Image (cartoon, helix red, strand yellow):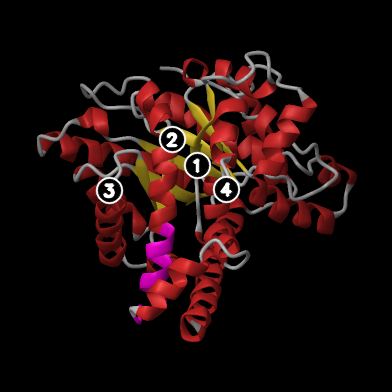
């Protein structure tokens, strides 16, 4: 089923429904207990074509550090003398389970492609294959929902954990992908995992995966370098690297999955993440309108979701056949001194550090609340 067929009661003429008709599923990059209990998540599904939810340590940190939605549960956990790590995951798992239940009808309508809710392994394990895999198994078992996805970072140590998790039938959201070169390794890890799952006699139709390619952070880093270079040519290239990078990734996806023919297995769809613009001078919907195409997902913060609705500027399929022009942009950037290998390495490290810091801040906050209650 296509994203357009999966959309239920949303306005068929809305920009998000138009996006679904092109083949891009809209997921929400946010989750909180308040959003679930207020009915807001249900409303977004019914009125704004939202077909899934992604989370990360920063999102849970923001959700659990404000308001009173978690007070009763934290008090109960304090009574049990729960450790902060256990408490945080118990709260997060409960939210993911509830969101999975809200999205269960979408999951059924789409044959499991959408209606997904992602929860991430502890980012502190990003350089440890065995700990990553062990926690992926634990989270999959504890969430206990067929429409969950376990997020595993695409670090060198994460890649074998991705393969092993898929081989056991765990649906995986591969996160923190910045380069096409690393994405090629992610695709290989996915295909190896699916082949092993087939050898293990598993039902491949139940295993789904997305590959989360980060977009806006590319522009933030490269724009800073372009402004330091300061030439007219450099300044003209601002805001073009992130989209070009994603379009090159999509071209690789099309090439790699054009002859993917393991019976019952699904393509691993590209998911565009970090799609809220960081530079207010750029159109708020640019990482959506410029990255629309078949077999893709775009996970958006609510502000970006609303910007797409307000602008109404969906331009049709902007991905298919765009790889060559994206390569031209890359050639121009390299010719004026942009070192992409250096950019990717820096962004991966910063991405992990950001999530680790958010996780540790959350642990400290919950630990203090456990001690008070």
Q: Is residue 366 left or right of residue 187?
A: right
Q: Is residue 48 magenta?
A: no
Residue denoted by label 4: 35
Cα gap from disc 1 to disc 2, whole angstroms: 9 Å
Q: Quadrant of the N terminus?
A: top left
Residue denoted by label 2: 103
Label tally: 4
Which of the two discs, 4 and 2, labels the residue nearer the N terminus? 4
Task: Select label 1 or label 3 by which is in front.
Answer: 3
Which of the two discs, 2 and 3, labels the residue nearer the N terminus? 2
**From this viewpoint, which residue is outermost toward the right?**
232
Residue denoted by label 1: 53
The reply to whether the C-beta atoms of the residues labelled 1 and 2 are less than 8 Å apart is: yes
Q: Secondary structure at mark 4?
A: helix
Cα gap from disc 1 to disc 3, whole angstroms: 16 Å
Q: Secondary structure at mark 2?
A: loop
Q: Residue at x 42, y 33 (%)?
A: 115
Residue 51 image position (x, y, % from top left): 50, 31
Cα gap from disc 2 to disc 3, whole angstroms: 14 Å
Which quarter of the picture shows residue 106?
Answer: top left
Residue denoted by label 3: 144
Q: Residue at x 50, y 75 (%)?
A: 366
Q: Residue 195 shows which numbered tag?
A: none
The part of the chain drawn in magenta is: 81-92
């Amino acid at each position: 089923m296509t994203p357009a067929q999966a959309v239920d009661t949303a306005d068929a003429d809305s920009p998000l429904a138009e996006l679904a008709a092109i083949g891009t599923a809209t997921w929400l990059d946010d989750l909180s207990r308040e959003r679930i209990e207020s009915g807001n998540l249900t409303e977004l599904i019914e009125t704004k074509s939202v077909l899934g939810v992604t989370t990360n340590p920063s999102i849970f940190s923001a959700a659990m550090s404000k308001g009173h939605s978690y007070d009763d549960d934290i008090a109960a956990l304090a009574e049990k003398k729960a450790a902060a790590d256990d408490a945080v995951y118990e709260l997060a798992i409960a939210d993911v389970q509830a969101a999975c239940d809200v999205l269960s009808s979408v999951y059924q309508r789409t044959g499991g492609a959408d209606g997904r809710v992602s929860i991430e392994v502890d980012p502190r394990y990003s350089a440890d294959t065995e700990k990553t895999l062990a926690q992926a198994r634990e989270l999959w078992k504890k969430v206990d929902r067929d429409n969950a996805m376990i997020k595993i970072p695409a670090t060198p140590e994460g890649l074998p954990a991705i393969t092993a998790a898929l081989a056991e039938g765990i649906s995986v959201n591969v996160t923190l992908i910045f380069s096409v070169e690393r994405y090629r390794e992610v695709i290989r890890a996915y295909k190896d995992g699916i082949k092993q799952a087939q050898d293990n006699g598993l039902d491949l139709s139940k295993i789904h995966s997305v590959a989360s390619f980060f977009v806006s952070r590319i522009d933030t880093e490269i724009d800073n370098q372009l402004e330091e270079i300061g030439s007219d040519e450099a300044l003209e290239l601002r805001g073009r690297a992130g989209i070009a990078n994603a379009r090159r990734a999509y071209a690789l996806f099309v090439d790699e999955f054009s002859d993917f023919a393991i019976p019952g297995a699904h393509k691993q769809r590209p998911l565009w993440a970090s799609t809220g613009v960081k530079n207010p001078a750029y159109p708020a919907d640019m990482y959506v309108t410029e990255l629309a195409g078949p077999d893709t997902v775009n996970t958006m913060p609510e502000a970006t979701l609303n910007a797409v609705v307000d602008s109404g500027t969906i331009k049709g399929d902007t991905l298919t056949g765009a790889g060559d022009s994206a390569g031209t942009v890359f050639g121009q950037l390299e010719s004026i001194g942009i070192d992409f290998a250096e950019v990717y390495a820096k962004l991966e490290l910063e991405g992990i550090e950001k999530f680790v810091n958010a996780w540790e801040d959350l642990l400290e906050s919950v630990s203090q609340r456990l001690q008070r209650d």
